[in-house]
Image (cartoon, rainbow, N blue to C red):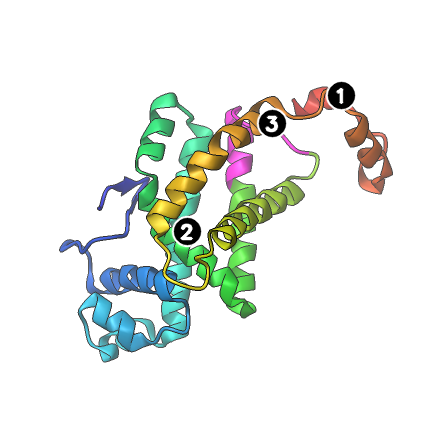
């Protein structure tokens, strides 16, 4: 299951063209996503078909390996989101939906990261928010997204909403503490939320601006800024 993900490759089956370092990293993303971050280097090494010593040779430590995984996962998500938001097309959307299971290892890794908590999880969240703000701004520049009064706050909200809904969906399925079929879970989540999410993001919810005007007027940095045309 290896196809293009906007310059990245889908993670799932061995690829003889990968370097040893990349093969270890991909195996670690899958193993950490499936089993959590208490999983040791030996299990990652076994999944990659290498020795534990070779893992440490390439990454220095388990934390070094995780940092490399974080970087790859964040980059793959950023690339996919940027492509979708700056060059939207019906064909592109349908292609992504058809191959949604390819993203399962990335989603699994993200969920396990935030479940584990700690400094690495907080750092990854901050990077994810920063990346979100970046590709949203690229969408604004491309004319496919509306601008925001507070781009950083919008990026943080959307990131929290996306991660929170995914983790709640898994919680309600009763699989969060045991083996998860991440491909099936992601497919079911996508089928459930895609229409209402796109409807809300595209057409909005409220029929007037009363609530927004009230909140904007209370903010010292945006006092009196109720010119909605600028943000349409």
Residue positioned 56% across, 50% down in the render: 164
Asked if labels 3 and 2 touch by Cβ distance under 8 angstroms, the answer is: no
Q: Which residues are magenta?
A: 135-148
The answer to whether residue 153 is above or below residue 94 is below
- Can residue 82 be seen? no
Residue 107 disc label: 2
Q: Earlier in the sequence, mark 2 or mark 3?
A: 2
In the picture as drawn, the residue positioned furthest to the left comes out as: 16
Asked if labels 3 and 1 touch by Cβ distance under 8 angstroms, the answer is: no
Judged from the image, the secondary structure of the residue bearing numbered disc 3 is loop
Confirm whether the magenta stretch covers residue 138.
yes
Q: Quadrant of residue 48?
A: bottom left
The answer to whether residue 40 is above or below residue 171 is below
**Disc 1 and disc 3: Cα gap in Å?**
17 Å
**Disc 2 and disc 3: Cα gap in Å?**
27 Å
Residue under pointer 1: 208
Residue 104's spot in the image, x, y percent? Answer: 36, 49
Residue 146 disc label: 3
Judged from the image, the secondary structure of the residue bearing numbered disc 1 is loop
- Can residue 134 be seen? yes
Judged from the image, the secondary structure of the residue bearing numbered disc 2 is helix
Q: Earlier in the sequence, mark 2 or mark 1?
A: 2
Asked if labels 1 and 2 touch by Cβ distance under 8 angstroms, the answer is: no
Depth check: 36 or 55 in front? Answer: 36
**Disc 2 and disc 1: Cα gap in Å?**
36 Å
Residue 73's spot in the image, x, y percent? Answer: 39, 53
Q: Residues within 10 Å of mark 3 (few under 14, many from 20)?
A: some
The answer to whether residue 87 is above or below residue 28 is above
């Amino acid at each position: 299951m290896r196809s293009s993900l906007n310059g990245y490759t889908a993670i799932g089956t061995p690829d003889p063209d990968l370097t040893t370092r990349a093969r270890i990293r991909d195996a670690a993303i899958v193993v950490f996503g499936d089993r959590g971050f208490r999983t040791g280097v030996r299990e990652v090494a076994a999944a990659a078909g290498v020795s534990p010593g070779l893992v440490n040779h390439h990454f220095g430590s388990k934390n070094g390996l995780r940092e490399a995984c974080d970087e790859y996962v964040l980059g793959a998500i950023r690339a996919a989101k940027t492509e979708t938001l700056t060059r939207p097309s019906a064909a592109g959307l349908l292609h992504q939906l058809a191959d949604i299971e390819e993203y399962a290892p990335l989603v699994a890794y993200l969920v396990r990261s935030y479940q584990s908590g700690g400094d690495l999880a907080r750092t990854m969240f901050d990077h994810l928010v920063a990346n979100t703000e970046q590709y949203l701004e690229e969408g604004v520049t491309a004319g496919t997204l509306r601008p925001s009064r507070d781009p950083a706050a919008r990026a943080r909200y959307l990131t929290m909403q996306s991660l929170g809904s995914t983790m709640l969906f898994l919680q309600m399925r009763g699989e969060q503490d045991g083996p998860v079929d991440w491909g099936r879970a992601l497919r079911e989540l996508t089928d459930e939320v895609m229409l209402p999410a796109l409807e809300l993001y595209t057409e909005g919810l409220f029929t007037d601006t009363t609530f927004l005007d009230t909140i904007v007027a209370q903010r010292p940095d945006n006092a009196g800024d109720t010119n909605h045309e600028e943000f349409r």
